[in-house]
Amino acid sequence: MKLQRRILRNKNTIALISGILIAIAFLSKWTVGNVPLFEGALIIASILGIAPIAIQAYQALRVKVISIDVLVTIAVTGAFIIRNFEESAIVTFLFLFGAYLEQRTLNKTRSAIKELTEMAPESALKQMENGEFQEVDVDEVDVGDILLVRTGAKVPVDGTVVSGEGSINEASITGESIPVGKAQGDSVFAGTILDNGTLQIVADRVGEDTIFGRIIELVEEAQDSKSEAERFIDRFAKYYTPAVLIIGLLVWLFSKDLELAITILVLGCPGALVIGVPVSNVAGIGNGARHGVLLKGSEVIGDFSRVDTMVFDKTGTLTMGNPSVAEVAYYGNNTDEALGYLASVERESDHPLAKAVLEEIGETRFSEVEGTEVVKGSGIVATVNGHRLAVGNVALMEREKVALSQQARADISRFEKNGNSLVLTAVDGELKVLMGIRDQIRPGVREELQRLRRLGVKNLVMLSGDNQGTVDVVSRELGLTEAHGNMLPEDKAAYVKELIDKGQIVAFVGDGVNDSPSLALAHIGIAMGGGTDVAIETSDVVLMNSDFGRLPHALGLTKATARNMRQNIVIAVGVVLVLLASVLFSDWMNMSIGMLVHEGSILAVILNGMRLLRYKLRG
């Protein structure tokens, strides 16, 4: 075993020695005509070269796999038996040299991932008990520790700025290298670099829990996964390689031409076919990681590249997810008291609309809230100071049997037409406050949606729990195909299922817990990176830093990757067919030329796959 490991470890050195011996052999023949030296050098080169290949073949046979190494070992042994030492030496050398070039080129293909891991922070300046900052290993940082980040240093953890100002390059998280200004209260992320300034931060998430740690984990998992095409080729190779062996045997039995039979074994090697698809996948996933797009597995690429319908959640996806109160109407007396009760209820909610309501009310007197009941998709009912408070949409008012005056109904209609989300507040069954809250559409979303159309997405659909009036306003502004409001999470999931049942390839884009059923159900779930952990875990694709502009790049990249895979399959199959045709219908083909072309085709598919590392969406 030790000898086997030693031989495999020195495979490249063996290839070099074989190459030198082959050169000595031909030089001796052409210069002094020394045939014994010519044959001796080729015999030694053949024996040295076949050693690592035969070991790999033996290891494959032990697990009942007929690999390419088995074919080459049989072919070279046959050439050796018929004393064709030129062929045996050159074929083993080319095979080993080709493997060396493959490994070198593949390492470059994985460079995008390597660059990512190299960005991982290793140390941090941590505030000790005496108040001084001391450099420690990043593993020694705990949540809640205060850290100092100086100009040029990597941010060691996900945290919040407690003092100082500076500009941070967040390319490792978002793919966008334009520095982002940071000050007290702003969030910072591990692996990003402070371009200028000095910051003190408090650690919120450390180690593998940071966004950067999760990116590395997800990308590594994605690289290890196999696409449908890869699994097919694995199955194909499992039967193809033994088939080539049988064909070689039959050719020998019928033609009695051993050289022709072993030449067919060499020419039939499926190396380029086996390696072509994984190279495309790894390069595509690596490009995505560099540009703020996490493709969670090779399987994602096939479905995503064929998407014809994209369904979007509204808030936090097409809109900023940071709404503010645009219009207000009050009814009856004791408005201040009602606003105080409303603020008391909304203070306990983490809904985006609650934040907007609290900002609108400002300073007020809070009261104790009891018996809170969340009515799914409608709002909240609670008791405040002995009064029954209902805060939510029109459906909740109807459920609570709150009478809506003609004026109130006119206001509701007007607010909806203006594109507002509605928050109605009733105290003891009487409507007191109507607020219209509006969210801003993300900058550039309309242009990005047009790019998606140009990439072949036929239907752009929005589903929202918001009222139909607001949904229609946003839809008109963005030029969507369809838009549906007043939808609960189960309604959205049912709608997605309906589209799938109609035969459409559906991607769902969302960010919240309520989007998780639809993200899981769609062919492709796409989560905005700033969304909830559940949404990110459920999805197939994550757009880091919630950058909607990454979506067309992600779609274009998967299309280019799928196209690249097909090109590699055509190259691999085409070369094998041409080689086999050449050996049957011409007299210039032999084992050495066949191995040279075979290795050339492997390098061709690797280089073709590497083009994806430089992919950029045009237009």
Image (spheres, rainbow, N blue to C red):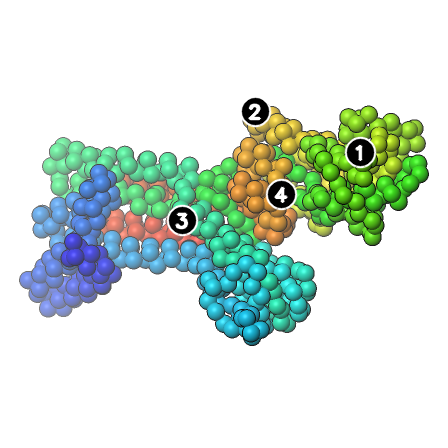
What is the x, y in percent for residue 388? Answer: 80, 33
Label 4 or label 3, whichever lies nearer to me, is 4
What is the three-letter code of the residue carrying label 1? Answer: Arg
Q: Which mark identifies residue 501? A: 2
First along the sequence among labels 4 and 1:
1
The reply, left or right, for residue 269 in relation to residue 335 is left
The residue carrying pointer 4 sits among few (fewer than 14), some (14 to 19) or many (20 or more) residues within 10 Å by Cα, namely many
Residue drawn where x is 62% and y is 49% of the image: 530
What is the three-letter code of the residue carrying label 3? Answer: Val
SS of the residue under disc 3: helix
Q: Are marks 2 and 4 in contact (CB under 8 Å)?
A: no
Label 2 or label 4, whichever lies nearer to me, is 4
Q: Which residue has dot 1 on it?
A: 388
The residue carrying pointer 2 sits among few (fewer than 14), some (14 to 19) or many (20 or more) residues within 10 Å by Cα, namely few
The reply, left or right, for residue 48 in relation to residue 124 is left
What is the x, y in percent for residue 579? Answer: 28, 43
Residue drawn where x is 73% and y is 32% of the image: 378
Q: Which mark identifies residue 279? A: 3
Distance in Å between CA atoms under marks 2 and 1 = 44 Å
In the rendered view, tell whether residue 374 sits above or below residue 31: above
SS of the residue under disc 2: helix
Distance in Å between CA atoms under marks 1 and 3 = 63 Å
What is the three-letter code of the residue carrying label 2? Answer: Asp
First along the sequence among labels 2 and 3:
3
First along the sequence among labels 4 and 3:
3
Label 4 or label 1, whichever lies nearer to me, is 1
SS of the residue under disc 4: loop
